[in-house]
Amino acid sequence: MSSDSNRTNRIKLLEQWTKENPDDPFAFYALALELKAIGEIVQAQDRLNEICAEFPDYLPAFQMLGHIFLEQEKIEAAKKFFQQAKDLAYKQSNHKAIREISDFLMQIQLHYYE
């Protein structure tokens, strides 16, 4: 079986998983990650935005959007999503995520603004 066929099968399985588990944000997140992995960035962003709207407490979606925008050098968008992630991490008392996100925001500031 070819690599493309494996990827297509994974996408189909993940899409089925989202249908069977509509209340599980991780199902949608896993699909978004797979889409990103095969280069379907716009589709991945769309899925991540849907997660942020449907599951506003799902921190990894905000972080991943920050990373995607940073990779695209869309700095203001990246900062926006990292800041939302940081605010959510504070709300959840997720100290590890607070540190990681704060580091990303500091690196963005140092790299792009100084």
Image: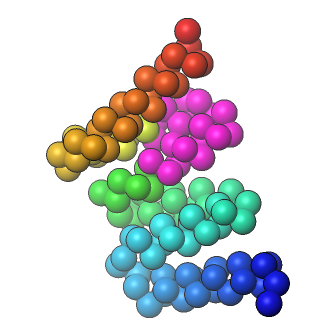
Q: Which residue is situated farthest in the top direction here?
A: 114
Q: Is residue 62 left or right of residue 12?
A: left
User: What residue range appears in magenta?
Assistant: 63-81
Question: Is most of the magenta stretch helix, strand or loop?
Answer: helix
77 over 107 or under it: above or below: below
Residue 45, x across and y down, in percent: 59, 56
Q: Is residue 4 magenta?
A: no
Q: Taking the image as drawn, is residue 42 in sight? A: no
Quadrant where the C terminus lies? top right
Q: How many marks?
A: 0
> Percent from the top left, x then y, of residue 27?
45, 76
The residue positioned 52% from the left and 49% from the top of the image is 65
Q: How is the image coloured?
A: rainbow
User: Is residue 66 one of those drawn in magenta?
Assistant: yes
Residue 35 can be seen in this image: yes
Q: Quadrant of the N terminus?
A: bottom right
Q: Residue at x 61, y 69 (%)?
A: 34
Picture coordinates of residue 46, whole percent (x, y)? 59, 60
Q: Residue 101 falls in which quadrant of the image?
A: top left
Residue 29 against residue 13 in the figure, above or below:
above
The residue at the point 68 percent across, 57 percent down is 41
Q: Quadrant of residue 53?
A: bottom left
